[in-house]
């Protein structure tokens, strides 16, 4: 693309709950100029003690904290989150280790504008209860030889939205859930999440009938 044909800059809001390794991958990609026309303009955490907030601060990115327990129910928490998105002029919302449930009105307000990274090759080891180490424990218990990560759009169906990118990772003999988690992050998640963000920000993703097409 030439400067005259580049899409306008897009504001990226990243949702976090923990250590923020995927956030760091996005920050590093941004510093290398690999997020296209996107810019991380705010990080929102569901926990005030999340180390991801430190990562954001070190990168000079504004932060917010919205704790679930400060709201009586999921509906009101989701309303507060939507208000934050509006105030931050969100173009893209990235769930990067965000462990709090939002209701369907958030997806409806931002159709195909919320993406999530999942540590398995969807439709394997996904859906309710499959998060964090639980995913890798299930993969090892099943004895799969290949696992990986998936970046997908978020819909009302848990881990059921249109798939954007996937990357396979070999399971090695003697793996533990912890070693497998680390390899999946390093070899898959940290690569395909920034790439999916770039493709979105450059308007290269089209969704039709729940299938994502990537423009050349």
Image: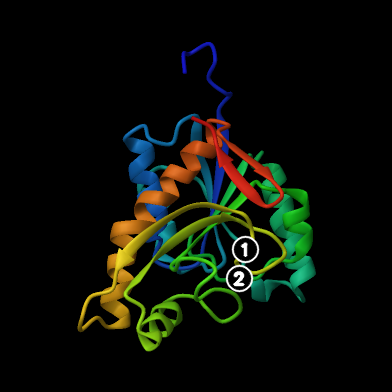
Percent across and percent down for residue 8 are: 58, 24
Label 1 secondary element: loop
User: Hey, which quadrant is residue 7 in on the image?
Assistant: top right
57 sits left or right of 110 in the view: left
Seen from this angle, which residue lies furthest left? 174
Determine crowd level at label 1: few under 14, some 14-19, many 20+ residues with C-alpha closer than 10 A: some
Q: Which residue is mark 2?
A: 100
Determine crowd level at label 2: few under 14, some 14-19, many 20+ residues with C-alpha closer than 10 A: some
Mark 1 vs mark 2, CA separation in Å: 10 Å
Percent across and percent down for residue 176 are: 27, 83
> Which is more toward the observer, 52 or 185?
185
Q: Which residue is mark 1?
A: 66
* Rendered view: 14 above or below 156: above
- Identified at 57% across, 66% down, the residue is 46
- Identified at 45% across, 69% down, the residue is 49
* Rendered view: 69 above or below 32: below
User: Hey, which quadrant is residue 132 in on the image?
Assistant: bottom left
Percent across and percent down for residue 105 are: 79, 59
92 sits left or right of 141 in the view: right
Label 2 secondary element: loop
Residue 86 seen? yes
- Residue 2, label in figure: none
> Which is more toward the observer, 169 or 52?
169
47 sits left or right of 175 in the view: right
Seen from this angle, which residue lies furthest top? 4
- Identified at 68% across, 52% down, the residue is 210
- Identified at 62% across, 63% down, the residue is 66
Percent across and percent down for residue 28 are: 33, 44
* Rendered view: 34 above or below 23: above
């Amino acid at each position: 693309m030439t400067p005259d044909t580049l899409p306008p800059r897009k504001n990226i809001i990243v949702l976090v709950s923990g250590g923020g390794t995927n956030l760091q991958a996005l920050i590093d990609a941004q510093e290398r100029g690999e997020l296209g026309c996107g810019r991380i303009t705010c990080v929102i955490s569901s926990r005030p003690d999340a180390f991801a907030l430190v990562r954001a601060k070190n990168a000079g990115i504004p932060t917010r904290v919205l704790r679930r327990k400060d709201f009586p129910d999921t509906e009101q928490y989701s309303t507060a989150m939507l208000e934050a998105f509006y105030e931050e002029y969100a173009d893209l919302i990235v769930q990067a280790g965000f462990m709090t449930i939002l209701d369907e009105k958030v997806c409806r307000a931002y159709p195909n504008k919320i993406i999530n990274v999942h540590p398995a090759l969807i439709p394997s080891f996904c859906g309710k209860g499959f998060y964090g180490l639980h995913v890798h424990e299930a993969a090892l218990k099943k004895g799969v030889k290949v696992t990986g990560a998936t970046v997908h759009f978020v819909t009302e169906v848990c881990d059921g939205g249109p798939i954007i990118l996937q990357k396979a990772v070999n399971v090695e003999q003697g793996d533990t859930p912890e070693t497998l988690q680390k390899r999946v992050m390093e070899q898959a998640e940290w690569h395909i999440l920034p790439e999916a963000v770039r493709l979105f920000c450059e308007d290269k993703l089209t969704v039709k009938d729940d299938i994502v097409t990537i423009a050349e």
